[in-house]
Image: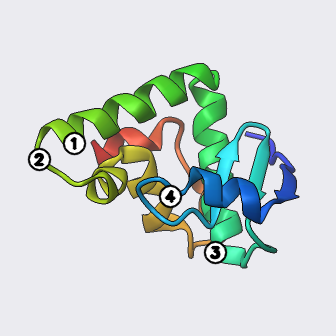
């Protein structure tokens, strides 16, 4: 898939507002990456992984599944923070955010390997 150049917005106020269950450094809301400050390369890569996930699920599908996996983890007794880390999209992004070549070799719907 062709590399997509996201639009980056620096907004500490928005990130603080989104920090309900976990301290949000950055959040990806297609086609934007919103960050509290300039992004380190690994966090930028993490957020770009989310952009690809969102594109392959036509954006809305990503958000529906994201909330579903979070609610499912909470229903299983996880805290909000632990439920966040249990989301397959987050698992894929955290496992691969240090591999700056990951998106060049990533298979479509690779997040399913983390369910």
Q: Nearer the viewer, residue 53 or 71?
A: 71
Mark seen at residue 74: 1
Label pair 1/2, CB-CB below 8 angstroms: yes
Q: CA distance from mark 3 to mark 2?
A: 30 Å
Disc 4 marks which residue?
93
The N terminus lies in which quarter of the figure? top right
At numbered mark 4, what does the secondary structure look like: helix, strand or loop? Answer: helix
Label 1 secondary element: helix
Residue ID for mark 3:
42
> In the image, 105: left or right of 23?
right
Q: Is residue 103 visible?
A: no
Q: Position of residue 14 (x, y in %)?
A: 72, 53
Other residues around mark 1 within 10 Å, as few (<14) / some (14–19) / many (≥20): some
Q: Are marks 1 and 3 in contact (CB under 8 Å)?
A: no
At a point 36% along the width and 38% down the height, the residue shown is 112
Mark closer to the observer (3, 2): 2
Determine whether 89 is above or below 11 in the image.
Answer: above
Count of residue discs: 4
Please provide percent x and percent y for residue 7: 88, 49
- Along the polypeptide, which appears first: circle 3 or circle 2? 3
Say if residue 53 shows up in the picture: yes
Q: CA distance from mark 1 to mark 2?
A: 5 Å
Please tell me which of labels 1 and 3 falls first in the chain: 3
CA–CA distance between discs 1 and 4? 20 Å
Q: Residue at x 52, y 43 (%)?
A: 107
In terms of secondary structure, where does tag 2 sit?
loop
């Amino acid at each position: 898939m062709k590399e997509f150049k996201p639009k980056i917005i620096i907004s500490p106020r928005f990130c603080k507002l989104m920090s309900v269950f976990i301290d949000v450094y950055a959040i990806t809301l297609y086609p934007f990456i919103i960050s509290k400050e300039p992004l380190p390369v690994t966090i930028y890569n993490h957020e770009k992984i989310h952009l690809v996930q969102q594109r392959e699920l036509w954006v809305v599908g990503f958000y529906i599944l994201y909330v579903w996996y979070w609610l499912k983890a909470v229903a299983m007794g996880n805290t909000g923070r632990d439920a966040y880390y249990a989301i397959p999209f987050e698992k894929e992004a955290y496992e691969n955010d240090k591999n700056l070549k990951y998106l060049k070799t990533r298979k479509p719907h690779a997040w399913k390997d983390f369910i």
